[in-house]
Image (cartoon, helix red, strand yellow):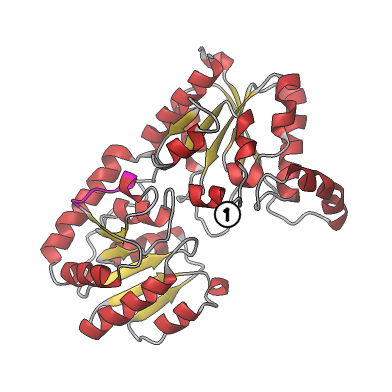
Amino acid sequence: MTNNELKLIWLRESFPWMGNHSGYEQVCDVIPELQPARYQSLWKNSKPLSKITKRLLAPIVAKVKNSATYNETSAMQELKTLLSHLSSSWNLAHVVYLERTLGILPKWKQRLSYKLVATAHQPVGLWRMRRHHPEMLSSLDGLIVLSSKEVGYFEQYIPNRVHFIPHGVDIDFFRPSSVEKPQPRCVFSGIWLRDLETLAQVVDKVLAKEPRIGFDMVVPIDRRENPHFFRIARHNQVKWHAGISDEQLRDLYCQATMLVLPLLDCTANNALLEAMACGLPIVSNDVGGIPDYTRDSFADLLPVGDVDGMVDRIIRLANNAQESAQRGNKARAFAEQHLTWEKIALKTIEVYQKILTK
């Protein structure tokens, strides 16, 4: 494939809880630096649609029924993508967030002669429970998944078209610092698929044994209405953060001793990757894609709900600064070796080439 043959449009979306250095979107910014071609980005509307527009698009959304997260804004983005084909004649569309966007484009593939690739972000458990419908996959020429465990599930629907490519991290921005850490601190970030019940029990038990350990909780204010957060908030050692800048988030990682991230499931996880890039050892769970992004040399992965195991690992790291630093260095090295956006972009380009040359 020559560079001129690639005419790519990305269907993209920004999220208010992600900064400029976080999230999967960055692969779209790196790819053009590595392979010159014709690229176009079409962003999902960040402002609410008018009532009239939503009413007009509602029948399309009702007919698609591909995903619980597909809505009128998704349909509008796809319609704009189709209109852009009239002027730019792209031959490959990459739906960056499959579960939130894909609905209309498959119906026009043959007529307009383009190919489709998408990236799935949600774990297969949500697909099994029909939050997302696997029938939507049949039109895809390629599917990128963020966890090796996802491959087998999706292969049953689209054999030989599923590609595992890890999520990346901006290692130039998220990097270790030489800041002193006089007291051990644990950082926790996020809401989606976090095991908050386990987190609350872990905080209680850790602070009962080692009250000098601190916890930094990065949780949006409007997402704190949860009994488990109320339980955690009883402790003076817990600090809450929301609406912080990219630099402030990075500073929290750099000031921490470890990332503590109880999970129910996941594919990739931004908090995990950013903490690793900042040189933190990891205490989390052996679920979903976490084993793809970690090694025993820097991550303690416990079974879901293993409160005592998590407490033991936290206290061990808090009481052994040398071990904590060594494991943190290995986490940083792993991110440098395997998870830079340049490496992820090159693998993504290979998938584009494979699809267009079929």
- Left or right of 321? Residue 172 is right
Q: Nearer the viewer, residue 238 or 119?
A: 119
Residue 303 visible in image: yes
The residue nearer to you, when weighing 307 against 296, is 307
Work out whether 218 lies above or below 343.
below
Q: In this view, does 292 lie to the left or right of 218?
A: left
Residue named by callout 1 = 15
For image coordinates 28% across by 41% down, the residue present is 336
Place of residue 254 in the rendered image (x, y in percent of width and height, measured from the top left): 29, 62
In what element is the residue under mark 1? loop
Residue at the (51%, 56%) spot, across then down? 18
Residue 127 highlighted magenta (yes or no) = no
Location of the C terminus by quadrant is top right
Q: Can residue 36 be seen in this view?
A: no
Q: In this view, does 33 lie above or below 211?
A: above
- Quarter of the image for residue 15 reads bottom right
Where is residue 262? Give x, y as percent. Answer: 37, 64
Residue type beneath disc 1: Phe
The magenta-colored residue range is 292-297
**296 inside magenta stretch:** yes
